[in-house]
Image (cartoon, rainbow, N blue to C red):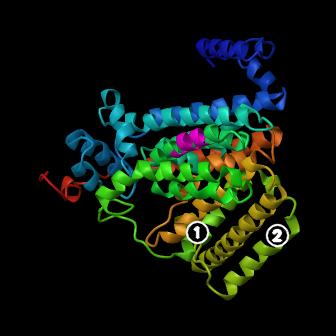
Amino acid sequence: MNCRAVFCLKKFAARMQLKHIFQGPGLLPLLRAFACRGDTRFLLLGCLALCLLIIMVTFSPPHAVFDEPYYLRYAQLLDRFGFSKLFLLNLPGSPGPLVAVVQYSFKPWTHFAFPQMRAVNVLVLGGILFVLSQTFKRLHPPRPPIFAFMMLAVPITWQMSGLALSDLPAVFFLSASTLVLLHWCRTDDRASFHLIFLAAVGGFLLGIAGLGRQIVLACSVAPLCCAFYRPARLLSAVAFAGMALLVVSPVFAVWRGLVPPSPLHVSAGLAPKHLLLSFAYSFFFILILAPTFYRRLLWLNIAIIAGGVALSFAWQVLDFAPLETVARGFGSHTYFMIRKLCSGVFVGAGFVFIINLFYHAWALRHDLQYLTCTVACFLIALAPLSIANNYSSRYTALALPFFLVLASHFTTCSVWCSGQLIVGSVLGALSLNSYYTQTPWSLPWEQVIRFGMSP
């Protein structure tokens, strides 16, 4: 480690009142840090994971990969048409215009080039971590603000923040909405004006998030569901949902629907397979963040997953295999077994998530903060049921601010939490690197401009 890096670490430690840990030359301070108490070790691991992400983005390919060409065109459309009807109608994907506004704001620095456009999402991630740290600090009872780094333990976070995709700006405003919503939960029922004000602000922030990823609007009714327990909050809960809908309605009116009139738009219709996948990914997100969430019903959970595997071999409920290219390399028979096994585990995991989610919701039903986050998680995880043509785990990962609040009730920044952060970060870094090695491509303007002027 060079002298400047050591100096920066010592300066940072002095501000955090950890100066005694960093006394010594070279790498010795870091070794002492990993031998110290759990929260300090966790903080250092979180900083190292974030630094690794920054390094990977800095040296990432200078061309668009995966879905990045779509969002490059989003920003270029805004530069070309301004925030106009033509801009909204010509959006080439299903997400809303928020990602274009964010990327356009940084145009003097990025010039719509890579990897600079990816670096914008890293900055957004920094904002999310700050908002989440304030959320944990203000929970009742408070949690360690550094628990926000657990977001990096979820591998999908690395994909969302290391690529110029549309998800992270939506997650930022959803995180801000969550911060305000939890303040709403802690406010006294008799403070009617204060409740309505907080609900309006939270709904406004949720509406902006909905302009990035419409799926997050599903949680707008979470306060309404919780108002059954606290009728005095009904009016403010209506204000929360109403404000969110008020923000997005002008854009939806231009589209005449919930998505742009793009040839790649999301098809409406029921998709039980996507619902199972969403619940299964929710299971794994919570498993990564707080394994003790499943401890109370451990043997029931094991039995359900075993039953899912047995059901998968007897009847095809779900046809799914992660790392399919790798699995096919083991031969047709082994690939068949892997596919059946993974499908069964995912089916069982989905049911385990729902059972445990409602079990803890009932046990903590008098904790309005926990109950509201539970309902919000469930509603966002439920939303992919209505998306017929495709599913991505990123849809469910939009609920990460709520997942993190739930997980904070069941874990602390211990040595186990540090291990979870290390494993999740390694998997996330490997996953992100696999995207960087994909073949670059571009989206022709002829496939983008469908209304108004020709390209």
User: Quadrant location of residue 329?
Assistant: bottom right
Rendered residue at 33%/50% (across/down): 69
Residue 183, horizontal then vertical, whole percent? 67, 38
Verify whether residue 295 appears in magenta: no
Residue 59, horizontal then vertical, whole percent? 45, 34
**CB within 8 Å, label 1 to label 2:** no
In this rendering, is residue 33 above or below 154?
A: above
Q: Decide if residue 152 is in sight here.
A: no
Residue range of the region highlighted in magenta in the rendering: 196-203
Q: Provide the residue designation for mark 1.
A: 327
Residue 63, horizontal then vertical, whole percent? 34, 43
Rendered residue at 12%/53% (across/down): 454
Identify which residue, 353 or 207, lies in the foreground: 207
- Hey, which residue is sitting farthest bottom in the picture? 314
Give amino acid for label 1: Ala
User: Quadrant location of residue 294?
Assistant: bottom right
In this rendering, is residue 120 above or below 426?
A: above
Q: Is residue 39 left or right of residue 270?
A: right
Residues under labels 1 and 2: Cα distance? 24 Å
